[in-house]
Image (spheres, grey):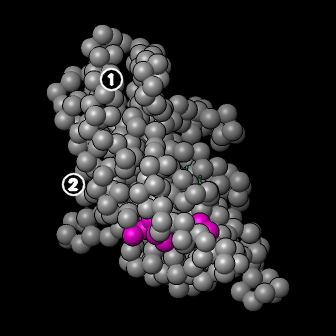
Amino acid sequence: MVDTKNQYHKIKPEIDNAVLQVMESSAFINGKIVQDFAAHLSSYLDVKHTIPCANGTDALQVAMMALDLQPGDEVITPSFTYIATTEVIALLRLTPVFVEVDPKTFCMDPAALEKAITPRTKAIVPVHLYGHAAPMEEIMAIAAKHNLFVIEDNAQAIGCDYTFSTGKKKKTGSIGHIGTTSFYPSKNLGAFGDGGAIFTNDDALAVKLKMIANHGQSKRYYHDLVGCNSRLDSVQAAILDIKLKHLDEYIIARRKAADFYDKAFAGNKNIITPFRAPYSYHVFHQYTLQLDGINNPATVRDALNEFLAKNSIPSMIYYPVPGHRQKVFEQYSAKTLHMPTTDWLTERVISLPMHTELDDDQLAFISSKVLEFINNNS
Ligand SMILES: Cc1ncc(COP(=O)(O)O)c(C=O)c1O
């Protein structure tokens, strides 16, 4: 699905040199490079504070811990997302409340969000899924009306610009009260191991987030809050600092690959290509098709997945089981929830290889194989 090896080879001297410098410095934890990377990322996102941490799941956990939520408080999040988004809600003894997504953008449906709000609701976690922004202007307006916190799960959309109705642009992750991201190697800004970060423009929240990610201390061995140990190490920070300089060109390469796929599938009545809402600069973490007008879509989609594999083309189903149908969430009566859009998508989505190193020959081969299968099975 990704080609991190060729991507590395293009910037190998820079990366190797940066890693060697960390070795020489022996500042493996909390070295200057971690602070430098955080400052560079803050300036890229135009956000006041970046708190690096160990991974994107921790970023969400630390964010929720900083909001002083109490057991049983409800946190609204889409069902159609990766488990990390919802898992941390349950881990903190909060109650995940699943809502539908928009079938075109795959992101939280504001109407469903508003309907799900109760007196126990305390926070909303929109997810910028596959690299497309959630409708943040509407979500922030609903949050303001009901006095709710917003944590943006930006693990899949770093670099995405959100355009407000005034024409003003902001990067996703910098719009809510807190934003989070993951530097998992396959992410648009990927490390060579695990990593994550938390963003906020709120000075008081930044102090708390920093403390919680560092055992609840602001001064060494003086612990004022219950925290955890969540650090980005210096080697990863050094690598990410270099890759950050290339992020915009990486996004352009992904968008070029998406344009190629779009053209190849245009007009096919059984394939819905990814929608690009005017407010979102799609950064194509994933290129996800929906199969349409086909009987037994899940069976056909799974057969397409196998057919591609036989032709040495990877493809993935993100995600085969939505949150409201996961066994782990049964206790929240999620199984009984009626979520037709999410269920519809779950049966029909398939993601094709998407990364910075795809060339036209590869894209032509992948799309021709998809079309060959669809034409023979629709
Ligand atoms: C939407 C979403 N949220 C959170 C995460 C968690 O990130 P990590 O794997 O770095 O913990 C991921 C990463 O896979 C993700 O895709």
Q: Is residue 40 above or below residue 329?
A: below
Residue wearing tag 1: 370
For label 1, the SS is helix
Q: Which class describes the residues within 10 Å of circle 1: few (<14), some (14-19), or many (20+)?
A: many
Residue 161, position as x, y percentages in the image? 31, 63
**Is 170 or 24 nearer to us in this picture?**
24
Indicate left or right for 345 with 292 as reference. Answer: right
The residues colored magenta run 235-245
What residue sits 46% from the left and 55% below the top? 9
Q: Is residue 331 magenta?
A: no
| Amino acid carrying mark 2 in the image | Pro
What residue sits 21% from the left and 24% below the top? 268
Residue 319, position as x, y percentages in the image? 51, 36
Quarter-of-image position of residue 292: top left
What residue sits 19% from the left and 35% below the top? 263
Residue lying furthest top: 376
